[in-house]
Amino acid sequence: MTNAATDVLTLVVCGAPLAARASDVAAALGAIGWTVTVVASPASQGWLDVDAIQVVTGRPVLFEQRDAHQASGPRPAAVVACPLTMNTASKAGTAIMDTYAAGVLVDALAVGTPLTLVLMVSDRLWRHPAWLGHLATLGKAGARFVSPTTGLVSEPEPVRSGTGPEVVAGFDPAALARTVGAPRRS
C-alpha cells in the first residue's frame, strides 16, 4: 500500500540532545490520535531510548529503509522532525537521500506532505553561509518551523551552544502535538 493513511505520522529523529525526548514526543502525538512511526538517523542512536519508543508506538524504530522484498507501508499524512539537525535539514533542502531519515523528509517535501520541523542547530553553526539558503528552501516548500525551546510555531532560531540539557528539560512535547494537531479523519 502506498497511499497516504489519514492517521499515520512519521517522526524523524536526528542526532541531537532533544532526541532523548523522542518517546515523549511520540506519546504526545499518539495521545491526540496519530499512529506514529519513528524513523531515526544513524547519528541519533546514542540519544534514543529505543525500547521506550517501541513501547509507546508499538513498533520498532527504523534506521534503515525497507528491503526490496518487504512490503511498503502507507505514506504518512504528516511528518514531524524533532530534533532536526543542520546535517539532515541541509540534505532535505538539497534533495540528498543518503539516510532513511533524510529520504523521508525529501519525499515529504516532494509530494507536499505537511512537514513540521523542530530545528536543533547551535548558534555556532547557524552562521554557515549555506544554512540560510537551506532554511529558505524548506520554508518555500511549506515546512512549518517550531521552536525547540517552546514547541510552538516560530521563525527558525538557533540554540545557544552548550544549552542542550536545558532545551531537553524545557521542551514541551504536548505543545508540539497541539501545534501539529490531530489527524483529519476521512
Image: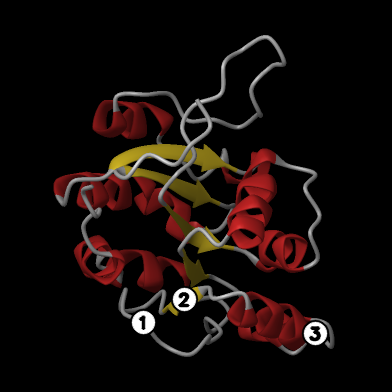
**Please, what is the three-letter code of the amino acid marked with disc 3?**
His
Instruction: Name the quadrant containing residue 162.
Output: bottom right
Rendered image: mark on residue 144: 2
Q: Is residue 19 left or right of residue 66?
A: left
User: SS at mark 2?
Assistant: strand
**Residue occupied by mark 1:** 153
Q: In this view, does 171 lie to the left or right of 10?
A: left
Whichever of callouts 1 and 3 sits on the residue coming sooner in the sequence is 3
Tag in front: 1 or 3: 1
Q: In this view, does 129 lie above or below 13?
A: below
Depth check: give the residue in front, 27 or 160.
27
Q: Which residue is situated farthest in the front direction here?
A: 186
Whichever of callouts 1 and 2 sits on the residue coming sooner in the sequence is 2
**Residue occupied by mark 3:** 128
Q: In this view, does 68 lie to the left or right of 122?
A: right
CA–CA distance between discs 2 and 3? 21 Å
Depth check: give the residue in front, 9 or 44.
9
